[in-house]
Image (cartoon, rainbow, N blue to C red):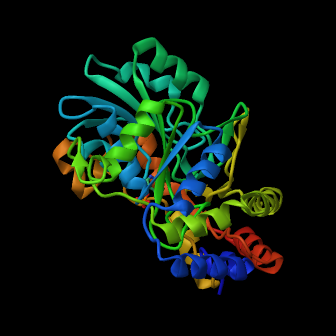
Amino acid sequence: MIMANRLDRGFFRYQEEFEAKALSVLRSGWYIMGNELKAFEEEFASYTGAKYCVGLASGLDALWMAFRILGIGAGDEVIVQGNTYIASVMGITMNGATPVFVEPDEYFNIDTKKIEEKITERTKAVLVVHLYGQASKMDDVVSLCAKYGLRLVEDCAQSHGAAYNGQVTGTFGDIGCFSFYPSKNLGAFGDGGAIVTNHKQIADDMRVYRNYGSEKRYYNKVVGTNSRLDEIQAGLLRVRLSHMKELEEEKALIAKRYLAKIDNPCVKLPGVRENASMIWHQFVVRCEYRDELAAYLSDHGIGSIIHYPIPPHLSEAYQYLGYKKGDFPITEKCVDEVLSIPMYNGMTEEEQSEVIDVINSFRR
Ligand SMILES: *Cc1c(COP(=O)(O)O)cnc(C)c1O
């Protein structure tokens, strides 16, 4: 049995380091907003090349708090791709703002040629999602945002370290939002998130906002929230961050083998955008007979996952936006065809070969 993902393999590789760190935090007597968080924020900022990082409790918090800090709310529109994880959209709507969907390009990112036609006088921001670890076409997005005076927020929950033209995702606009959910490339052992920014004011505001709006203990400047990255997670993230390069390279090697050896006319392999350096979060193939392929894999003991089976505009949660099937045909076709096949740190060559052989033997 080859599972779609194996988080235990990533843990066991550095087990001693993780356990030593957890123990040292437990024994320190300091569990929230301490030295581990401070050190992680500095190290993660430098990993992305941003000036500031603020640790938060989740990726969703990073998203909704980003729009909150930027003052985007009721009556405002935010442009976002249609084929994203629903958290991207919730980050917008939790503030009362309206998501305006744009179809994806062939790399599963926002189709930058289709942004301009969606801009109205209510448009306040663009949220790009670097889905599956692939950087969006940022030169186009940055120039459109400059042309129309729009804020730029990046959902980097799946793109830690991915770059476009050598610049790391999360640093192109006002705020880059990260998740450290365990299955993300930089995953914690529980929930966690962060924003990165080059603007001191945004970083300062975010620090105040995450801690009940208080800069000084018990003196509250604004009505904030509780969204703090705790010391244990920050410490464990520091351990994982110190190994990111080898972890990324290992997944890139698996991807390279898949790209070279998966050969089935029914199965379309993912492409890598020109000038982009992908970090492999998911290995997403497309297949017109996706459900049959998934069932075939499962019959042969191989797990797979659909990221994501229902696009936000057709989700029950967003019925109130009034969309119906057929409104975003490219998004919907994509949703019907994508399948993430197993790719995880610690995946053996035998496991990779088995996945390759089974996919190659699939016939319709
Ligand atoms: C995981 C994810 C989020 C949400 O992160 P959480 O830490 O689970 O809140 C947001 N956007 C995308 C694209 C994600 O993959």
Residue 252 percent coordinates (x, y): 77, 57
Residue 152 percent coordinates (x, y): 45, 29
The residue most toward the top is 147
User: Which residue occupies 19% across, 50% down?
Assistant: 319
User: Which residue occupies 58% across, 67% down?
Assistant: 235
| Total labels drawn | 0
Report which quarter residue 172 is drawn in: top right
Residue situated in front as seen by the camera: 314 or 124: 124
Report which quarter residue 237 is drawn in: bottom right
The residue most toward the bottom is 1
Residue situated in front as seen by the camera: 206 or 130: 206
Residue 139 percent coordinates (x, y): 60, 23
Residue situated in front as seen by the camera: 287 or 168: 168
Residue 289 percent coordinates (x, y): 54, 62
Q: Is residue 249 visible?
A: yes
Q: Is residue 315 left or right of residue 277?
A: left
